[in-house]
Image (cartoon, rainbow, N blue to C red):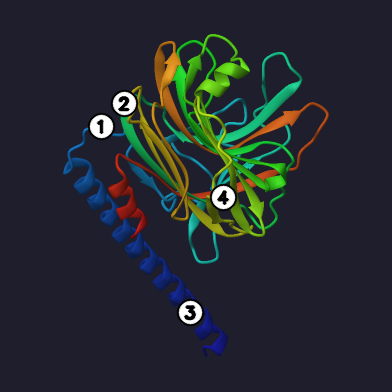
């Protein structure tokens, strides 16, 4: 005799198997579609600018749930390896990368001061990107239980490296003031062999600052290289609540020439638009990095809470048209 409970169990098994089969074919269809887009747009177009040395689409769907195991990417590692990086799954079946920084993770002392940093950053392998056009996108989510701190928390950076010397990112996205300030910007150049004076920083810096005002990002000022700080600005963008995804799109033409650019969009809204020289460092160029994750300041004697950020759909291609086609899928 077969009981009704057995029938229900078999039905649940069949439903699960059908769901898995449906997910498999959906994933395969998506992969084929993205492959065709990349082939068509990265080989069929002609560019006056150099192509991005990176071209990939990573949605983390082919990774096993749990601790990240990959040879396609690397980490900005100072001891914790892949420990901060986990593959997790939402109730709807979507897989994503979870990145966590804790007190004491990857501590990196800054010079001889009492300040340190803690980091958990994820990146494609660094490559030579001078003279190249690069378009980057990723989805980001702060979990509902995320705790902001009254200090810098950087979650994206594009950084040119010099063989000898210290450099700052060309562009970084950073929270300040318990998450109520968003600063976008970085350093276009300088002398990497020594610490910069404030005068040099003012000469090479590109920056803008947004403030969370009644649930919207409201631009407070912007400054591009040697120009004076401009407070006559009116940029706005939507503020994403905890627990919800947002999409960032970043375009960079990494060049010594005046036709360079850095553009940052959040959920389709332009938040940063710099045009001009983007590489003006003195010293021998080595390579460039694209990093997502967490990189925060730490002061000795102050213990910050654990912080986790979710990332998904990490994409890097050679032109905006290709990226928009992928994002529209």
Q: Which mark is residue 131?
A: 2
Q: Residues within 10 Å of mark 2 (few under 14, many from 20)?
A: some
CA gap, disc 3 to disc 1?
58 Å
Secondary structure type for disc 2: loop
Question: Which residue in the protein does label 1 denote?
Answer: 49
As helix, strand or loop, the secondary structure at mark 4 comes to strand
What crowding class fits label 1: few (fewer than 14 Cα within 10 Å), some (14-19), or many (20 or more)? some
* Residue 195: image location, x then y, percent: 60, 13
Q: Nearer the viewer, mark 4 or mark 1?
A: 1
Residue 134 placed where, x, y %? 35, 36
Whether the residues at callouts 3 and 2 have beta carbons within 8 Å, the answer is no
Q: Quadrant of residue 319?
A: top left
Can you say whether 264 is above or below 144 in the image? above
Q: Residue at x 26, y 47 (%)?
A: 38
Q: Residue at x 16, y 44 (%)?
A: 44
Query: Tag 1 or tag 2, which sits nearer the N-term?
Result: 1
- Of 2 and 306, nearer the camera is 306
Marker disc for residue 310: 4
259 up-or-down from 139: above or below: above
Q: CA distance from mark 2 to mark 4?
A: 31 Å
Identify residue for label 3.
10
Q: Of tags 4 and 3, which is closer to the observer?
A: 4
Q: Which mark is residue 140?
A: none
Nearer the camera: disc 3 or disc 1: 1
N-term mark: 3 or 2: 3
């Amino acid at each position: 005799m077969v009981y009704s409970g057995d029938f229900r169990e078999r039905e649940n098994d069949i439903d699960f198997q059908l769901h898995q089969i449906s997910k498999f074919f959906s994933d395969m269809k998506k992969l084929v579609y993205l492959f065709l887009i990349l082939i068509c747009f990265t080989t069929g177009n002609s560019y006056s600018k150099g192509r991005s040395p990176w071209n990939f689409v990573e949605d983390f769907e082919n990774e096993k749930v749990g601790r990240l195991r990959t040879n396609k990417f690397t980490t900005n590692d100072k001891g914790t390896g892949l420990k901060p990086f986990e593959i997790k799954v939402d109730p709807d079946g979507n897989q994503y990368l979870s990145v966590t920084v804790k007190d004491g993770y990857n501590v990196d002392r800054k010079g001889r001061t009492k300040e340190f940093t803690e980091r958990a950053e994820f990146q494609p392998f660094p490559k030579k990107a001078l003279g190249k056009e690069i378009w980057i996108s990723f989805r980001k989510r702060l979990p509902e239980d995320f705790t902001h701190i009254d200090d810098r928390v950087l979650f994206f950076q594009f950084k040119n490296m010099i063989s000898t010397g210290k450099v700052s990112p060309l562009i970084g996205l950073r929270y300040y003031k318990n998450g109520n300030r968003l600063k976008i910007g970085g350093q276009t150049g300088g002398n990497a062999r020594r610490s910069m004076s404030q005068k040099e920083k003012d000469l090479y810096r590109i920056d803008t600052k947004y403030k969370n005002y009644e649930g919207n990002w409201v631009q407070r000022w912007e400054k591009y290289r040697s120009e004076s700080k401009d407070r006559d600005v009116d940029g706005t963008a939507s503020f994403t609540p905890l627990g919800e995804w947002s999409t960032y799109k970043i375009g960079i033409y990494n060049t010594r020439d005046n036709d360079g650019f850095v553009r940052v969009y959040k959920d389709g809204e332009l938040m940063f638009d710099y045009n001009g020289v983007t590489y003006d460092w003195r010293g021998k160029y080595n390579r460039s990095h694209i990093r997502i994750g967490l990189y925060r300041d730490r002061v000795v004697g102050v213990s910050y809470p654990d912080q986790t950020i979710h990332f998904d759909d990490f994409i890097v291609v050679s032109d905006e048209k290709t990226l928009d086609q992928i994002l529209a899928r």
